[in-house]
Image: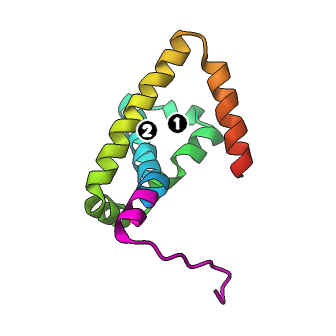
Amino acid sequence: KDIGSNPVFLNADTHDYILGLTSHLPYVVSLSLFYYLMKKDQGNLFDFAGSGLRDVTRIASGDPMMSYGFVKTNKEKIKVFLTEYIETLKEFLSTIESDDFLHVAEVVKKRRDKIW
């Protein structure tokens, strides 16, 4: 509290659930996106990358040992969340195919803007 933090006490399962969704999954998604782009790169892909890609993949440059630790200890929840996220990506693919992407993007933007 002396440094401005707000300590919260959680049981281990709640901690793993919350951090799995808000920290571990975003890290794995960021890492996997950058890994995918590395595989697609033919030598100059990143010469054309801008701040959007930098922002989305920033956490992929985190300490690999730290991330290995939380992936190893929270593996089961991360696997569930990643599987569910893959289904969400499929839903987004459907919104692109059905021309409903703009509506979904607007709904998501409105909710995100309320948080930050």
Judge whether residue 63 can be spotted in this image: no
Residue 52 locus on image (x, y percent): 62, 39
The residue carrying mark 2 is 33
At mark 2, the secondary structure is: helix
Q: Amino acid at mark 1?
A: Phe
Residue 44 locus on image (x, y percent): 49, 31
**Is residue 35 covered in magenta?**
no
The residue carrying mark 1 is 46
Q: Amino acid at mark 2?
A: Leu
> Within the image, what quadrant is residue 17 found in?
bottom left
Q: Is residue 48 left or right of residue 39?
A: right
Residue 24 locus on image (x, y percent): 41, 55
The single residue placed furthest to the top in the displayed view is 98
Q: CA distance from mark 2 to mark 1?
A: 13 Å
The single residue placed furthest to the bottom in the displayed view is 2
Nearer mark to the viewer, of 2 and 1: 2
Q: Residues within 10 Å of mark 2 (few under 14, many from 20)?
A: some
Residue at the image point whose x is 62% and y is 25% from the top: 104
Residue at the image point whose x is 26% and y is 53% from the top: 76
> Within the image, what quadrant is residue 103 found in?
top right
Q: Which quadrant: the N terminus?
A: bottom right
Q: Earlier in the sequence, mark 2 or mark 1?
A: 2
Residue 110 locus on image (x, y percent): 72, 37
Q: Is residue 114 left or right of residue 108?
A: right
Please say if 33 is above or below 68: above
At mark 1, the secondary structure is: helix
Residue at the image point whose x is 42% and y is 23% from the top: 90
Examine the residues drawn in magenta and state their main secondary structure.
Answer: loop
Q: Is the Cβ of the residue at disc 2 closer than 8 Å to that at disc 1? A: no
Q: Which residues are magenta?
A: 1-18
* Res 55 label: none
